[in-house]
Amino acid sequence: MTPTELEQLQKRAAEALSLRLQKRQVKSNGKPAERVLLICAGGACISCGEAPVWEALEKELVRNNLHDTVHMVQTGCMSACDMGPLVIVRPDNILYQHVKPEDAARIVQQHMLRDEPVTELMYRPHPEADPIPNPDEIPFFSKQVKIVLETCGIIDPENIEEYIAMEGYAALAKAVSAMTPQQVIDEVKASGIRGRGGAGFPTAIKWQMLHNAPGSEKYIICNADEGDPGAFMDRSVLEGDPHRVLEAMALAAYATGASKGFIYVRAEYPLAIRRLQIALEQARRYGLLGRRILGSDFSFGIEIRVGAGAFVCGEETALMASVQGRRGMPRPRPPFPTDSGIHDKPTSINNVETFASIPAIVRRGGKWYAGIGTEKSTGTKVFALAGNVNATGLVEVPMGTTLREIIFEIGGGIPGGKKFKAAQTGGPSGGCIPAEHLDLPLDFDSLQQIGSIVGSGGLVVMDEDSCMVDVAKFFMDFCVDESCGKCPPCRVGTKQIYKTLQKICDGKGSEDDLAILDDLCDVLRSSSLCGLGQTSPNPTMSTLRHFRDEYEAHIKGHKCPAKVCKQLLTYIINLEKCTGCSLCARNCPTDAISRIDGQRKYVIDQDKCIHCGKCHEVCRFAAVAIE
Amino acid sequence: MAETNTQEAVQINLTINGKQCTGTRGQTILDVCKANDIHVPTLCHCEGLKPVGGCRLCIVEIEGQRRLNTACTTPATDGMVIQTETPRLHDLRKRTLELLFAERNHICPFCPASGSCELQQSGYDHGMTHVRYGYLLPRLEIDNSHPYVALDHNRCILCSRCVRACDQWVGAHTLDLCSRGSLTQIAADNGVPLGESSCVSCGMCIEVCPTGALFDKISNRVIGRQEVPSTASVCTTCGLGCWTSVKTRGRSLLQISSGKGPDNNQIICKRGRYEALKVANRPALKQPRLKKAGEWADVEWDAFAEELAKRITSGKAGADRSRVAALVSPSLPLETIAMVRQFFKDVIGSERIGWADGPELTSVARAFGMNGKSGPLARMSDLEDSDLVVAIGVDLQQAAPVAASAVRRVVNARTAQYVELNPRLTDLSVLSSYRIATKPGRDSVVLGATLRTMVQRNLIQANGAAGAIDDLPDTAEPMFEAATGVAVEQVVRLASLIAGARRPIFVIGSGLTAQGEEAVESVINLAVGGNYFTEDGRYRILEIPRKANTAGARLFGHPEFTMANFDFAKTDVLLMFLGDDEPIWPDGWLEKARPMVHVSVFASHTQPACEIAHSVAPLATWAQREGTFVSLEGRVQKAAKLLDLPVGVQPDAEVLAAIAKAMGKSFKPDVEANLPGGVKVAEGQFVPTAEPAGQIVTCKSKAQGAKSRG
Amino acid sequence: MANTQSNEKLKVATVWLGGCAGCHMSFLDIDENLLELAKLVDIVHSPIVDTKEIPPVDVGIVEGGICNEHNLHVLKDLRSKAKVLVSLGDCAGLGCVPMMRNLFDTQDVLDRAYVAGESTALGQVPEDEELPRLTDKVRPIHEYVKVDAYIPGCPPNAESIWKSLQALLSGKPAEFVKNVSHYD
């Protein structure tokens, strides 16, 4: 295929997609109007029952003889994960949420046949509010700026022509036919994009180093070893729009002179792997990968390497070891991968999200991209919004958007009218941000200043019911498990911190323990070999910094203010409410609950109580109080 | 290391702790510090192993760098300003040490390594008096399944030195790490007990272990914690001549370790470490014995000498001294061999001195035209830059484990392929990218045909021998496959593999060399035909000698006889000088010797040959005398005298002098004069090398020969 | 701390907790320096002094780690009465041999000692309210109280004990004595 042929194909393919891209009301004139049902097949929707919905809709369409009039498309993640299973009807542009198989009849008969959208399935900000049928008017969607997720949720990820229809591979065609490799790097440089994997290293500098490195054997690696708990933007991109990443890798290879690429993706993402395999096969077939791409002299091939799911393999030197079949353990840098990487040859490693931003940059120009976001953190960032927030899912916003905008405008605030306590960004390498920083613009540098990081983009919202010591313990537990075991600060230090946090949560902490925590965090940060070890104390350090009073409450007052740490809770049976049903006593694992003599009431022997909380859990009369 | 003699040694200047230091580009910061006498603490670093930067003790501050870097991995660059000893670094190192002490069972009073432990020493160096962190102390296994090596995971600090030594030095890669985080452990193969693993029992892992996690079950018990000085020596268990470092106490040998030999040979093997120890410490002969009426009787030296003298000077032997013969083991030092030869010529008056060894001892010497010189053969170091190793008739792991490790290393590094010609599978067969099971004794035919194929198919330039090619064995011969067990395609594949390599090396062992001169010549023909020579003009052929002094024995020139062509009919009195060596006697050989008038065995211990002997005299073990040995490379090396002779055992010269005295003669050994061809051999130097042949050697009757043998 | 000019001698107490008494033996091995020491200090409480209560002292020296509740009681008592607390030996400072029981369950250890022993017949774990209970883990003393100086060694050799005491008595910190102190 030549660039001209690609252009022609694009036009044809866009034609085929036109129904889907339009947003207008349609009316059935005698016969039902032609429509398309976009059905989200992202991870969350699949797990809450997308497949039966698809089947039910298909059956219903056939039953009503509409299968030629109403088309169905399985798309990638539409990003509003807590609304799933999601269906968007175009051209009407109506969004149905929480669709169940039994809703299929209504959707088809009411909407497809009679042009009467099903209001009951539409989004409502709260149960009494009016429905909002148009997704573009739902705050969750309307406030987002989509570059990385530009076509994710619209196109069929298993059909290359749909990506091409959306100007896919146009950037590659532009590069190989009209740009020198240096011009591609310059465009990326002008965009100011920094690595989305965590460290925020300028992508253009990395590419320039690889470009300048001597020799002809060079490698490009796509780091798809997304390991942060709660982060799933890379997965969504790979599952929903794999060609975007392939095109970007080819662009990187063209710019740097690499001839071979690897995608290192974790085995826990089987769907991403399958879609990548399909995409690779299609791209090769269309002459967009392989020998003499788009008729040029440029050749580039990509192989998939499946990782076994070690968190540390997201670290670039460990990742390279794993790609080469060795134990995934980091090594000190220098030498940096751009000097010595795969097979000791120059190698550049970029994250999925970074790659996914590149085609738009080359197509629309670095300047355009640099206009989005802040001066030093340009472009958009995808956050995986989760935790105690009304709307969860993927949120792509310009860098510099404040936490408040994300949590309260896009995310719709904290459920149950509870108070916001903290937001955790950057996963196990990040930190907790307290309410006082809600108006901080989120970018690489501002987050670093308050002891957190953008990281891969995990954003967990916590309300007043979260114990910050417990949160620190949770992340440290993760680091204990995921330390590779090579250097003592990380291998032993994480375990020591975990044990100390455990001690504090159990009410056995002393004030010396806070000094020990500071001490250990310092060793880890300063002496660990790799980024994983160096950043692993961040959740602990940031909670010590912003929530020291909570630690002190655990230690001095033997109280867990959020009532999470069970060993610090006292369970008391409220005799007014107790009905004497004996359910608590029967469930108590230590027989600490007994009947008060002569009464149909129960009481807890505090000496025997192990604070497991079972009585509180099982009581049907809310008679077990926690103090 | 890049030294000054390599072309580009670029000097760099650094400032370390305020001091101006110089180094060479390519060195790490640690290298420069060491060269400039600046101590930087390390635990995972081990000279000769690739650095990993794991233990975090060698962290240093580099001006302009935000993070601390490890000295062992960071390349030194010109103009670097480095601090290696600041209060901050000292503090971080101490805390890292405390984390290590808190991790597992590092309770010194109970540890075999206490006193020589690097972790403990680091604790002392950093003034560690207590551990501020809580002890984790998991209860881990002690792997005691191996006959020589014990592995106590409780004392392991996961520095991975053993893993790297096993991989980078030994090439076995038996050890590696398993699991993650605080559960990480050393594992053998895929987690089997060490004793059931692919371990080759070389014990290098013990040598590099900085703590008491890996320890030597044999030696640890006897050495304990005492300081025992070491003596440098060379290993005499095979012909490689690896350097050793030996600990002794009183009359026993305690421990043998690697002496870190020349050409970067870091290792010794199971034989050198454990079997040599057993030989030195096994029950030995302490007194001469005579067989009278079928019963052995211990006698004094005088009685033994008189009996032997009587047998030599009376009967047919007395009249014709050529009926007295000697078989000398090529595992004995040059001095002993020279003395026996002098004794035979001057005292007995017989020239019949042969070798208690197989025909390879002479076939190799003849084929390479050694005659008082060493053959123009490749050295161990030539393996390292080879891209194809062709092993012919040798099970390297059995014959010379250290050479097997060299092959494993190049194959593991993917810089070389390994090809094997052997009727039987060997320990290295798993590494081979191609192997041919030739019929025993047919290697020369296969190799000749391979050369012929290489020339005929224009795979190589016929190196001035195009004419001779027609005399080489031909795969077109109708009986070729039946005779050799090798199909034509196999020869073609072998030919293309060899021709496709730029620097092949042919490793030959007794399986080939015992087939005789012609077999050896077929390999030489390949080297000549394909022009496979080292830069200094030696054949790219590495011969693995079986005995410690095989290379030395060959210097005495030829013709000689070996066990293979020993003439029983012409011998009445046979003296066998065996020492520690137990030769592999050809079938029925000893029975044929039994009817002789007198057979006398000179050995350190009771062995099969004593069974048919009429008299037995004790000789020193390898550890009880100083001696000169010639290594496979032709290097002249001294084995040290490590132990005193036990009461009753005489030095070799006095044994011979006693027999001479009983014969009424005097014997004054003049070792120097009796060394081969008057070659002056100085320790550490190489004996002169013979010129390689420029022509392919052909055998006219080859075709008939092949048929008649078939 | 010390004032050698005044005639007032410093008061020293030593205690023997979970250890083998080897550290005290090694202390006596300072030989002729004992005379020197006697000029500077009075040992007012020690396993070799017959006093029941620990009086207030200038220096308290602890041998042994914390294996049972009695150890802990004595340690806390001494800490409250000593201006300077010194950890003597590896059991007090590093846990050492007694700590190896932490690899096992306490009950198993007791059974092994009192019931399953090869020379034991009809054995049973002693149980009396007079007997102090074992702590669940053996720990070095600094995990319970503040320690001012450490003299490592199993036992510490006499030279390191003397050098450390000299330093302490002249008001200097007792540091690890290079080439003298050791852990075994």
Image (spheres, grey):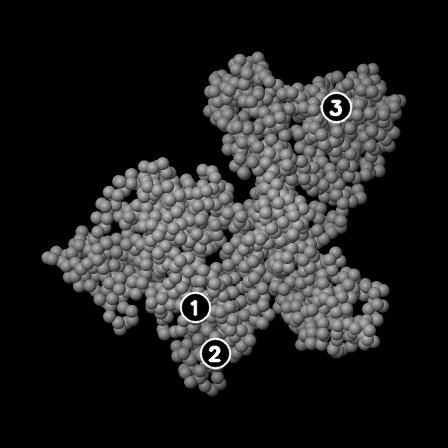
Q: Which image quarter is the N terminus of chain B in?
A: top right
Residue that mark 2 sits on: A627
In the rendered structure, the residue with mark 1 lies on which chain? A
Q: Residues within 10 Å of mark 2 (few under 14, many from 20)?
A: few
Counting residues from the N terminus, which is met first, the one under dot 1 or under dot 2?
1
Which quadrant of the view contains residue B569?
top right
> In screen coordinates, is B4 left or right of A453?
right
Residue C139 appears left or right of A272:
right
Residue at 63% x, 43% y: name it.
Answer: B23
How many numbered marks appear?
3
Q: Are marks 3 and 1 on the same chain?
A: no
Q: Are marks 3 and 1 in contact (CB under 8 Å)?
A: no
Q: Residues under labels 3 and 1: Cα distance?
A: 88 Å
Helix, strand or loop at label 1? It is helix
Disc 3 marks a residue whose amino acid type is Val
What residue would you read off at disc 1?
A: A437
Q: What amino acid type is highlighted by mark number 1?
A: His
Residue B462: give x, y in percent of width and height: 52, 18
* Above/below status of A247 relative to C145: above
Judging by the rendered image, the residue that carries numbered circle 3 is B679
- Depth order, front residue of C16/B125: B125
Q: Position of residue B621 (x, y in %)?
A: 76, 35
Along the viewing direction, whichever of B236 and B148 lies nearer the viewer: B236
